[in-house]
Image (cartoon, coloured by chain):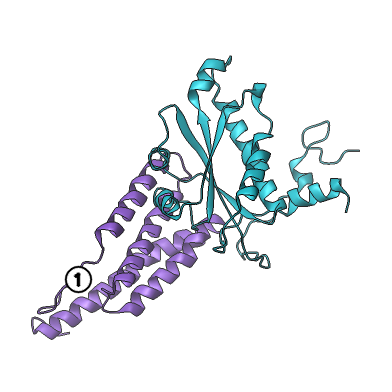
Amino acid sequence: MSVQGKIEKPALTEDQAMQLIAFLTSSAEITLQEPVHYGPLRLIDAVSRVIGFMLENGVCDDQGFYRDLKSEIDTKKLWCMWDKPAFYQFLRETPAKIATEVVTRDSTRLAASGERPS
Amino acid sequence: MSDKHAILENMTSRRAVREFTGEPVSDDDLFTIIQAGRFASSGGNLRPHRFFVTRDPEKIRQIKAFSPGMVARPPAIVAILIDHDQVAEQWVSIDPSMIIYVDVGTAAQNIMNAAHALGLGSCPVTSYSKSGVKAVLGLPERMSVEMLIMAGHYERKARVVNPGAPKPVRTRELTSWETYGNHDPA
């Protein structure tokens, strides 16, 4: 998120972006023949990788949120191997958790800028 | 323990290892486990597989980038390749693919059992981009990458059984004697 007056650092270096490109294009290829639940696994794993790069680059305003999310993903993505219902439930719940964070951050930012009360 | 029991114990105690120490794997150990792969049974004794070994951290990093299923960065990778020119020249069957993959499987299992016998951990990886890894390895057109095996030293840990894990399958339940569904030899 941009904050007025703050100098933005890129979330990813070119090398990191290339690693993600390699991961995502490879995932797109192999999901043609892999079990159906591996598709969501690759996507959520990609999220973990993006967060990992962001933490590595020190671009997160709230490291705790990202660190916790990455840790949760890295634990629960493995559930697809032995507890698919729990894995699917985790996938269904995760966007809501992120949406809550986005709404909170937007409210805080708007309140700080005087555009809208929090 | 007799040799016979030692072999059986080795086969049944091997597990997939996905965490490795940084200790390098020796040339001798790698040669030994590949030799075990080379001695695996092969349909028609045609042996269309080849082995590609790398311990180069940069190459391993590149392979891992195209292998979403590779969850560790191992100190060594053995890639099992198929030479499709050899298959085309020698094969007598209309569809050789099944035998090719059986050959890859027998070689992989021998490699992993041999690694285990040497105290090394290993894990097969099939979730990778065939075209991506082939390009990283700089293989000629006729070769394909059919399986990657991570190998390396590891720390032995107590086995953790995950709470939601399915019940272990028993040999008896997998086996029928004389009549399908009859699980006992009597």
**Residue A19 placement: quadrant:** bottom left
Chain that is cyan in the image = B
Examine the rendered structure and indicate whether residue B141 appears above or below residue B118. Answer: above
Question: What residue is drawn where x is 21% and y is 67%?
Answer: A10
Q: Position of residue A53 (x, y in %)?
A: 33, 66
- State the quadrant of the N terminus of chain B: bottom right
Q: Position of residue A117 (x, y in %)?
A: 13, 85
Q: Give the amino acid at mark 1.
A: Lys
* Crowding at mark 1 (Cα within 10 Å: few <14, some 14-19, many 20+): few
Q: Is residue A21 left or right of residue A6?
A: right
Question: What residue is drawn where x is 61% and y is 53%?
Answer: B26
Q: Is residue A111 left or right of residue A59?
A: left
| Outermost residue, front side | B27
| Outermost residue, right side | B186
SS at mark 1 in the image: loop
Examine the rendered structure and indicate whether residue B149 appears above or below residue B142. Answer: below
Q: Position of residue B155 (x, y in %)?
A: 63, 66
Mark 1 falls within which chain?
A
Total labels: the figure holds: 1
Palette colour of chain A: purple
In this rendered view, identify the residue nearer to me: A76 or B96: B96
- State the quadrant of the C terminus of chain B: top right
Question: What residue is drawn where x is 45% and y is 55%?
Answer: B57
Residue linked to disc 1: A9
Examine the rendered structure and indicate whether residue B82 appears above or below residue B72. Answer: above
Q: Is residue B34 left or right of residue A7?
A: right
In this rendered view, identify the residue nearer to me: B120 or A93: B120
Examine the rendered structure and indicate whether residue B29 appears above or below residue B110. Answer: below
Q: Position of residue B133 (x, y in %)?
A: 42, 42
